[in-house]
Image: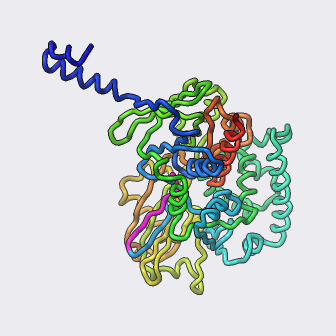
């Protein structure tokens, strides 16, 4: 039908058909040539890092991000009087390749503490004011308990070395079929108090109960913590790191508000269909390869052609996730005596309760303080789902928890700001699964010209995002 033939139709019909034809014409604004060597889905740490390494290798990349901002969980909230606190990612651990990347870009970093944290156990605070993890633990448990701990910790080191030697040996396979909690109870030889120390220190990392993850992944998490790595923060807020990487990549190579709905892989390239989150206009981008860096739960929202292999589908469907919920608490500066001794802060503190891990935000001297609560596990699930009521109910629950922990703290609270996450935002592997099993291996292998990256392909931490970016870029550069 031509446009001129519309004139012979009734006006309301011709107008409807004209609008429909315009829609047909605009759906899929195809590029005749590849827009880049590689398309990257997602502008979180993994996506930004992938683009960074590709550019350094002389390859072009365009990032398609569904939200109006970059960084993923690297987000910093700014408040009055130059105060700020992290919304998502709190730190970059010493062994994270992102730390080297940031040093290359001359992004200023700072560190204040080590991998173990102050914590509460049976209502008593154990403050970390020591020079090392081992020295701190010696203040927590007895000499005999310490001997058993050192023996067990050395066993964990040896087991982790075996785990890293892929594929898993037969003697390690049973560790997939038992929870970290049950395995520790049955085999560790640790005292109940030392076992609780292990639980309290590790649960915030995978953001769920240690009864819900496999022993083999609990071993990996413990190795990560017991190494005593220093955690780094970006001076002025972690979001500055995301912006610095984006500046290096070039803002013209990052397309925001682009929801990826379809990914098609052929023998010669890829086609990625997006829907603009503002006007829902579809557009097709072409490239030689595509890297998906979206969270695991988002992979189920993308239609792949050809469909994902059965093992990749199973890997996605059977992996679980931990929960986070963030609260920024503005408090009177005079309340700092609750978390300081001799003007030295012993934050972060693992509350082992509704307050999660208590970090300290950045504020100028003598101004109101900002406490940053990274709540995890069942408490995060409760607050994210809103089953506890409205924001006033969440605030009251947190204030009651503060008051139980720090008597007289209630009058110091001036304001709370909440940030919610997807219920399974943090990668974890349930009993029967592991980051080291064959299903996880399938996600680390490309399907045609589609490569999978993101923290969930490696571990539960931001270093997994960085390592996955290095892996996929290295694989792509190998292609002719």
Q: Residue at x 78, y 62 (%)?
A: 191
**Where residue 82 sits: x, y (%)?**
42, 74
Q: Is residue 423 left or right of residue 445?
A: left
Left or right, 14 with reference to 300: left
**Residue 73 covered by magenta stretch:** yes
Picture layout, residue 377 above or below residue 266: below
The answer to whether 369 is drawn above or below residue 478 in the figure is below
Q: Nearer the viewer, residue 99 or 189?
A: 99
Q: Is residue 379 visible?
A: no
Residue at the left extreme, as displayed:
11
Number of residue marks? 0
Q: Residue furthest bottom?
A: 342
Which residue is at a point 50% across and 46% down the rendered structure image?
423
Which of the two residues, 261 or 340, is positioned nearer the viewer here?
261
Q: Is residue 98 magenta?
A: no
Please provide percent x and percent y for residue 206.
62, 52
Start-end of magenta stretch? 72-80
Task: Say if 231 sits above or below 377 in the image.
Answer: below
Looking at the picture, how far across and down is residue 180, in whole percent? 72, 49
Q: Which quarter of the rendering shows the N terminus? A: top left
Q: Nearer the viewer, residue 380 or 112?
A: 112
Image-quadrant location for residue 299: top right
Which of 84/377 is in front? 84
């Amino acid at each position: 039908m031509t446009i001129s033939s519309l004139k012979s139709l009734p006006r309301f019909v011709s107008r409807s058909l004209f609008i429909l034809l315009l829609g047909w014409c605009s759906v899929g604004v195809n590029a005749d040539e590849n827009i880049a060597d590689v398309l990257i889905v997602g502008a979180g740490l993994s996506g930004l890092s992938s683009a960074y390494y590709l550019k350094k290798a002389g390859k072009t990349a365009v990032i398609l991000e569904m939200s109006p901002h970059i960084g993923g969980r690297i987000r910093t909230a700014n408040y009055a009087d130059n105060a700020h606190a992290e919304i998502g990612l709190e730190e970059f651990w010493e062994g994270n390749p992102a730390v080297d990347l940031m040093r290359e870009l001359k992004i200023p970093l700072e560190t204040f503490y080590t991998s173990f944290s102050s914590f509460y156990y049976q209502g008593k605070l154990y403050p970390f004011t020591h020079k090392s993890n081992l020295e701190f633990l010696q203040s927590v448990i007895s000499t005999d308990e310490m001997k058993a701990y050192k023996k067990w910790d050395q066993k964990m080191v040896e087991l982790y070395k075996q785990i890293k030697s892929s594929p898993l040996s037969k003697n390690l396979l049973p560790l997939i079929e038992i929870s970290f909690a049950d395995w520790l109870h049955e085999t560790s030889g640790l005292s109940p108090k030392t076992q609780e120390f292990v639980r309290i220190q590790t649960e915030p990392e995978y953001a769920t109960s240690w009864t819900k993850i496999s022993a083999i992944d609990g071993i990996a998490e413990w190795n990560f913590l017991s190494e005593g790595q220093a955690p780094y923060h970006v001076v002025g807020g972690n979001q500055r790191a995301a912006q610095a990487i984006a500046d290096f990549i070039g803002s013209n190579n990052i397309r925001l508000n682009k929801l990826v709905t379809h990914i098609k892989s052929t023998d010669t390239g890829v086609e990625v269909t997006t829907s603009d989150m503002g006007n829902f206009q579809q557009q097709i981008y072409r490239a030689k390869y595509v890297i998906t860096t979206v969270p695991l739960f988002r992979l189920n929202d993308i239609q792949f052609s050809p469909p994902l292999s059965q093992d990749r589908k199973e890997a996605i469907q059977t992996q679980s996730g931990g929960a986070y919920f963030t609260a920024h608490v503005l408090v009177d500066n005079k309340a700092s005596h609750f978390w300081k001794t001799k003007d030295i802060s012993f934050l972060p503190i693992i509350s082992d309760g509704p307050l999660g891990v208590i970090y300290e935000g950045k504020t100028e001297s003598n101004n109101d303080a900002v406490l940053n609560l990274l709540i995890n596990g069942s408490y995060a699930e409760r607050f994210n789902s809103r089953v506890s009521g409205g924001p006033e109910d969440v605030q009251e629950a947190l204030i009651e928890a503060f008051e139980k922990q720090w008597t007289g703290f209630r009058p110091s609270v001036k304001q709370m700001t909440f940030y919610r996450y997807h219920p399974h935002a943090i990668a974890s592997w349930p009993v029967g699964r592991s980051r080291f099993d064959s299903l996880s291996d399938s996600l680390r292998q490309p399907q045609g010209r589609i490569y999978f990256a993101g923290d969930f392909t490696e571990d539960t931490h931001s270093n997994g995002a960085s390592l996955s970016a290095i892996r996929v870029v290295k694989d792509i550069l190998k292609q002719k």
